[in-house]
Amino acid sequence: MQLYELRECLYVAHWHRQLALPKLISFSQQRLKINTEIRTVQNRGGGLVGLSLTAMVFNVSFYVATSLIVLYFKDIGMSAFLIGLSMTITRFGYGISSMGSGAMADRVGRSIPMFIGFLLGALSSFLLSFTKNQILAALLVLLIWVGSAVYNPAAIALVSDISNSGKAMPFSLYYFFVTVGQIIGQTAAGIIIEGYGYRAAFLLSSFLSLIAAIMVRLWFWDEKRDRKTDVIGDLVRGVRIMAENRYLRCLAIALSLHGIGFTMSYTFIPLVARADQKLNDSQIGLILSIWSLGNLIGMIPLGKITDKIGGKKMLIYHLAASSAVWWMYPFIQDMSTIAALMLVQGIVGAMDLPARRMILVGISEREVATAIGSLDSITFLVSSIGNLLAGLTWGMGHWVPFVLGSIINLAGLFVLLLMR
């Protein structure tokens, strides 16, 4: 008997002990429906490669628009505190959106949230190209991030649907393509902005988001699914799965502390690069893309290792390594050393997402998108504090957000070590 079939038998046996026969029949029918939908997705033209290419196109769009957004905010007159506050609100909006979008993807199917997210990104980037008003610009950047939040849980759940294996490798392949898009977007952002200005970058971002939406419509559209709007119900379902699962709550606490540390150390890299390291926009885009290159190099090999050692152990190694390298950045001036550090940070970053997605599939097979959306929601809501803390501590010394972020991340490591 294959491992997947054995897991299914144990899963049904557990529910047989817990539920009355009528509920078991209803549950079995639901499982049959889900498995039928999975087979439909597996046979659909896009497949895992098509999905990964679609996400890659959107990621190019997203990073062309957002890689140097803190510099754009600075150029239109925002202070470091206001930049930190804006990014805090942005991550807060991403978190709220993730909570409902995951449940929506389990209810209406994967294609609708992806399509909506890409269209929202396209419209917001287009409008951003025509304004320098600080409040409106911050709002439109928030909407770009919300678009990403709406699509992401659905896309990750679709990876699980297509692969149907519970392994980390399909997620590693998906994130490999996503990271390629990130590298292209970050590199292009610096070149385009330096050569043609922010408007050209935002317009290109809008066009690419629209292309990604068309790819969803061609490859992954499902005409048979329910289209009814239930925003409150989707939010409630997202909260419920977090409230009912202790392991998921503990994981959310650990990764939220990790997220605070990451946002404190990563968000202001462009500001340190411009103010202290005297890099121009194209060089800043280059070092960010080197971080993504490290991510790309590590994604597939680390996915294979994750399948062997397990998701939790890989996350422990990831958090430990993160604190070891994050604090160093503001103390470096030499360009070659900066590039080497960013490459290492990228490889360390590749340890994260396939491991946490593998854990989430194991926690909830029936509501995998809801679980992903709930975890992303909590971690982004809490980690948004990191942007604000970075803005508040920036004046104490440009190194303070990086060092303090590394220390806060160690608290997340401690929680992860205590999880059982």
Image (cartoon, rainbow, N blue to C red):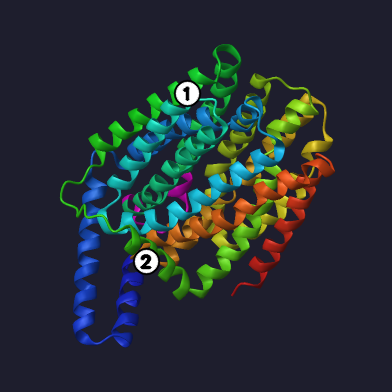
Judging from the image, what secondary structure is the residue with disc 1 in? loop
Identity, as a three-letter code, of the amino acid under mark 2: Arg
- Residue ID at (30%, 49%): 110
User: How many numbered marks does the figure carry?
Assistant: 2
The answer to whether 366 is drawn above or below residue 53 in the figure is below
Residue plotted at (41% across, 31% down):
57
Q: Position of residue 254 (x, y in %)?
A: 62, 63
Q: In the image, is residue 77 above or below residue 193? A: below
Q: Amino acid at mark 1?
A: Ser
Q: Label 2: few (<14), some or many (≥20) within 10 Å?
A: many
Q: Which mark is residue 399?
A: none
Q: Is residue 28 above or below residue 332?
A: below
- Residue 209, how many percent across, how many down? 38, 31
Residue found at the very far left of the displayed protein: 224
- Label 2: element kind: helix
Q: Position of residue 321 (x, y in %)?
A: 71, 51
Report the residue marked by disc 2: 237
Please identify the residue farthest to the top as the structure is shown.
195
As drawn, 217 above or below 36: above
x and y percentages locating residue 329 in the rendered image: 77, 38
The residue lying toward the viewer, choosing from 127 and 242, is 127
Query: Can the viewer see residue 413?
Result: yes
Q: Which residues are magenta?
A: 162-173
Residue that mark 1 sits on: 129
> Separation of disc 2 and disc 1 at Cα?
36 Å
Dot 1, crowdedness within 10 Å: few (<14), some or many (≥20)? many
